[in-house]
Image: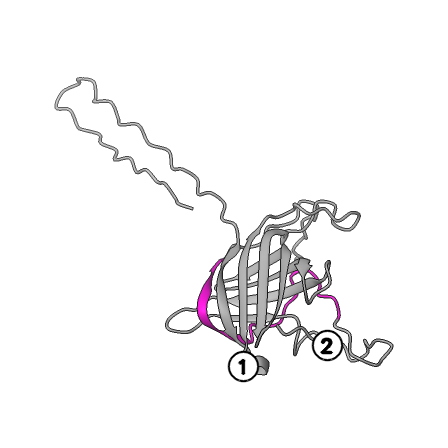
Amino acid sequence: MRITTIGATAAAVAVLASPVASDPAPAAPTAPVASVASEPAKAASVHGEARISYIESIHDDIRFTIHAEQTPFTRPMPPTAPEGLSTDARGTLKFSHTRGEVTGWAEAKVDCLVTSDRTATLTAVVTKSNVEEPGARLGISVQQGGKGEPGRLGFSWGVVNVDPENVDENGQLVRPRAGSCMAPAPFTTVIKGGFKVVHAEITKSPAQPETAIPRH
């Protein structure tokens, strides 16, 4: 197995005044009611850059830069998902891992993102690298730091994503391909920088029929 080391809501409130007349004179006109602007749809996202501490390479300089935003139903996958998925995403992932004078690095295009509160899981397909094959999908998990706690990050290589049955002709473990939005828990600690996670619920597929609630 080749283990890589490496928006704003605007609201207007109208005050309704209805003065009472002492005689049958016409009532004063009522102030028009201002409409309430609808809140723009929020997109799930994660942005930031950080250096992490990884127990297997405790003295190495390992850094990640992530800029990703969910773009539902923008990556058609016929015939199974002709309109794409609710977790479709766009953006970039970069990482570098320096040990001594040697640096491994990769750049990748984000293809999937899903969030929950201060956490995010995303995948990205490698476009350029000196340690990864172009086309390889990498899985990343992020936990935004808060209340004095550091951020955290996990990645789908190293000590995770191992299939004991998957070996090459020399008997060496081969890392399985990561599926979309698949990544381990954030098992490393951010020691410099950090990430900002914006959560949004996933939207229902327009191609998915409503499921009837069974009656008892």
Along the line of sight, the residue nearer the viewer: 51 or 177: 51
- Residue 189: say if magenta: yes
Mark linked to residue 178: none
> Measured from the top left, where is residue 86 in percent x and y?
63, 51
- Quarter of the image where the N terminus is located: bottom right
Q: Which mark is residue 162?
A: 2
Element type where label 1 sits in the image:
loop
- Image coordinates of residue 187 in percent, x first then y, are 56, 76
Q: What is the x, y in percent for residue 194?
A: 45, 65
Q: Which residue is drawn at 77% across and 51% down?
A: 80
Q: Which of 147/52 is in front?
A: 52
Report the front residue among 1 and 124.
1
Q: Residue at x 66, y 76 (%)?
A: 160
**Residue at 26% from the left image edge and 26% from the top image edge:** 30
| 93 relative to 72, above or below | below
Q: The residue tagged with tag 2: helix, strand or loop?
A: loop
Task: Give the residue type that dot 1 points to.
Answer: Ile
Q: In this view, does 198 lie to the left or right of 215?
A: left
Residue 188: quarter of image: bottom right
Q: Is residue 111 visible?
A: no
